[in-house]
Amino acid sequence: MNITLSVDERVAEQARKAAAAMGKSLNQAVRDYLEQLAGAALVESELQAFEQSALATPGRLEGWRFDREEANRRA
């Protein structure tokens, strides 16, 4: 897919230099950023789904409570 962006010439030139310093073209740097952005959105979506699932699950503790003495007891 081709995307057209409107960017100030000075910003584009600075971005081109920054990309070159990373050994990339400006096109590749933008492509990498968009892939990273899309991946971050996927991770955020998965985290939200996990949180909803965790909150909806009643758990399996069956009334068990953390006991400091039990946790510190030596075998």
Image (spheres, rainbow, N blue to C red):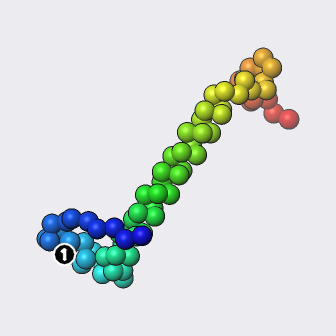
Q: Label 1: how many residues lie within 10 Å, few (<14), some (14-19) or many (20+)?
A: few
Measured as percent of width and height from the top left, residue 5 is found at 26, 65
Task: Please say if 33 is above or below 50.
Answer: below
The residue depicted at 37 percent of the width and 71 percent of the height is 2
Where, by quadrant of the figure, is residue 4 drawn?
Answer: bottom left
Q: Secondary structure at mark 1?
A: helix
Say which quadrant the N terminus sits in.
bottom left
Name the residue tied to disc 1. 13
Work out whether residue 22 can be spotted: no
Q: Count numbered badges in the picture.
A: 1
State the residue in front, 6 or 61: 6
Say which quadrant the C terminus sits in.
top right
Measured as percent of width and height from the top left, residue 34 is found at 41, 63
Where, by quadrant of the figure, is residue 48 drawn?
Answer: top right
Work out whether residue 9 can be spotted: yes
**Amino acid type shown at disc 1:** Glu
Measured as percent of width and height from the top left, residue 18 is found at 27, 75
